[in-house]
């Protein structure tokens, strides 16, 4: 069973408007969340992250919101640009309590393909 | 070269072949990872190496054999694969195994015929 889910496989948005990408998780032990962006023929690149002690983190046009009670996070892109067209992956990580070791493992969602139309 | 590189970018192999995927990171990181991305499925972690020691093997079949000769290089040796092993294989690295942010290579698109 997937612990991190991105229920929308694709999203189409007009340039200049807001893009909202959603992610849900089931494991309450996750305490750090990341968004990665992936262009075709390239590996995922880190975009923005948020710790569970926060409910919002902003970096330029990108803002991630975390709702711990709902086990939900979202990525907002404002304003959306055609160059933002890519697949966006949500990932979650927990602390040593889950994995019996000191490392941090990332559990990824299935991705959402964002298309920003000019 | 900068970042994380992977070779080859594309590979077609028969079920009886033996091949190897190579990953190299130029970031001075101490942890390296192999992920598998099958069609319409999330990235699945396969192996983790920290300071050249394998620290995680995520129940991967033995037909996949990783090797980490030093902290900059990671290999995935493939032997007697099945068609369902066709996928995008991604390598990643992070500063340490405790680092959340991982840096990915472009991947190797593997097709098993």
Image (tube, helix red, strand yellow):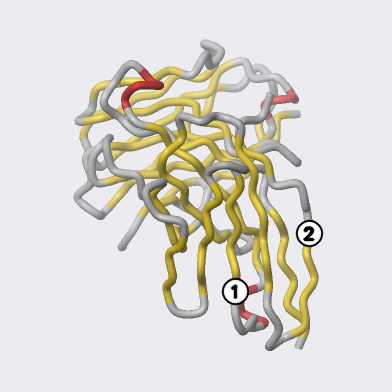
- Quarter of the rendering occupied by the C terminus of chain B: top right
The residue lying at 70 percent from left, 19 percent from top is B82
Q: Where does residue A5 sit, x and y in percent of width and height? A: 67, 40
Vertical comparison of A10 with B18: above or below:
below
Q: Where does residue A61 sit, x and y in percent of width and height? A: 51, 79
Which residue is at the far top?
B62
- Quarter of the rendering occupied by the N terminus of chain B: bottom left
Q: How far apart are marks 2 and 1 (CA)?
A: 15 Å
Please say whether residue B102 is visible from this viewpoint.
no
The residue lying at 56 percent from left, 44 percent from top is B108
Which residue is at the far front?
A69
The residue lying at 22 percent from left, 37 percent from top is B71
The chain under label 2 reads A
Q: Which one is nearer the viewer's eye here, B8 or A111? A: A111
SS category of the residue bearing label 1: strand
Please say whether residue A113 is visible from this viewpoint.
yes
Nearer the N terminus, badge 2 or badge 1? 2
SS category of the residue bearing label 2: strand
Q: Which one is nearer the viewer's eye here, A37 or B65? A: A37
| Residue indicated by mark 2 | A10
Q: Where does residue B94 sit, x and y in percent of width and height? A: 30, 45
| Residue indicated by mark 1 | A77
Do the residues at discs 2 and 1 belong to one chain?
Answer: yes
Q: How crowded is mark 1: few (under 14 residues within 10 Å), some or many (20 or more)?
A: many
- The part of the image, by quadrant, that contains residue B14 is top right
Q: Residues within 10 Å of mark 2 (few under 14, many from 20)?
A: some
């Amino acid at each position: 069973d997937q612990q991190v889910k991105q229920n929308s496989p694709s999203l189409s948005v007009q340039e200049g408007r807001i893009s909202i990408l959603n992610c849900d998780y089931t494991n309450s032990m996750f305490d750090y969340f990341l968004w990665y962006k992936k262009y075709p023929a390239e590996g995922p690149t880190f975009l923005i992250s948020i710790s569970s002690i926060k409910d919002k983190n902003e970096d330029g046009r990108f803002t991630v919101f975390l709702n711990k009670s709902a086990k939900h996070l979202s990525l907002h892109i404002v304003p959306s640009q055609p160059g933002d067209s890519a697949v966006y992956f949500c990932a979650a990580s927990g602390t040593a309590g889950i994995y019996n070791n000191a490392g941090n493992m990332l559990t990824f969602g299935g991705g959402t393909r964002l298309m920003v139309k000019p | 070269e900068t970042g994380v590189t992977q070779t080859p970018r594309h590979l077609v192999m028969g079920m009886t072949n033996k091949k190897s995927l190579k990953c190299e990171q130029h970031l001075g990181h101490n942890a390296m990872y192999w992920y598998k991305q099958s069609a319409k499925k999330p990235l699945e972690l396969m192996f983790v190496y920290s300071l050249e020691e394998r620290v995680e093997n995520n129940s991967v079949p033995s037909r996949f054999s990783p090797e980490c000769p030093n902290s900059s290089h990671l290999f995935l040796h493939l032997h007697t694969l099945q068609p369902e092993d066709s996928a995008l294989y991604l390598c990643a690295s992070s500063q340490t195994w405790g680092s959340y942010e991982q840096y990915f290579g472009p991947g190797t698109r593997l097709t098993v015929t």
